[in-house]
Image (spheres, rainbow, N blue to C red):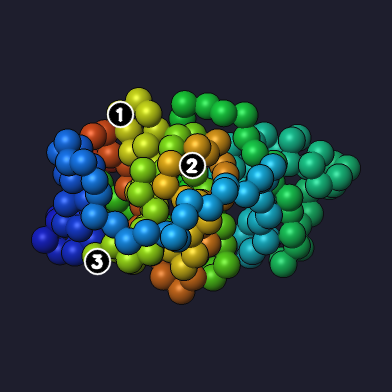
Amino acid sequence: MGDRKKHPLIGAAWGLMAVLFSGCASVPIAPVASAPQPLPSFKGSYHKVRPGDTLWRIARSYGLDVKTLTAANQLHGSTYLKEGQQLFVPLPVESQRFLWPLLGSLRASSASWVEIAAPAGSSVRATRGGRVAVASRQLSGLGKTVVLDHLEGHLSVYAGLDQILVSPGATLRQGMPIGILGSRVLHFEIRQGVTPKNVLALLPAE
């Protein structure tokens, strides 16, 4: 499924990026609401511990060091995690590197996109800080989709969401929740303009 013909999402995403950068006055998306909704004030998010999770893996995925994560949860040096345990994850210090948008398992990938599976209700986060360019309830072929403009030429695409938590024009910090996953996998891309980038090469190794 490495070429665009074998994956219908790629064609739709490519068309979306072309529209965004074509100089058109508007983007044909469904409105999220009748009026822009204020962005909730997030100081962090919560992570439910799943089999195989470790403090190191969780911290790295969220752009944190282990000491910050243990201190935020008052673990007092304990490294034992219990399945189902809720951990509070503070926002990371803003950086120019990309973070995993979702802590889950890699379901599929190509040179230009990845699909990440995680339990329903998992939080999808901004891979880097930026501004919400698109927040569509029904983008053709992609479902509920958010596109972030990182304001230096890169865009990130988050498709297959069950809920959208942000509105067009909202400014986000790295690590802020942008949506909630449902039964679908998260389709994630990073683009420079309309040019797809190798996502796995830009994300930190787990």
**Circle 3 sits in a helix, a strand or a loop, which is it?**
loop
How far is the residue under mark 1 from the one under mark 3?
24 Å
Residue lying at 46% horizontally and 74% vertically, measured from the top left: 183
Residue corresponding to mark 2: 170
Residue corresponding to mark 3: 141
The answer to which of 23 and 206 lies nearer the viewer is 23
Residue count near mark 2 (Cα–Cα under 10 Å), binned few <14, some 14–19, many ≥20: some
Q: Amino acid at mark 1?
A: Gly
Q: Amino acid at mark 2?
A: Ala
89 above or below 96?
A: below
In this picture, residue 55 sits left or right of residue 96: right
Quadrant assignment, res 59: top right
Residue count near mark 3 (Cα–Cα under 10 Å), binned few <14, some 14–19, many ≥20: some
In this picture, residue 188 sits left or right of residue 64: left
The answer to which of 100 and 35 lies nearer the viewer is 35
How far is the residue under mark 2 from the one under mark 1?
18 Å
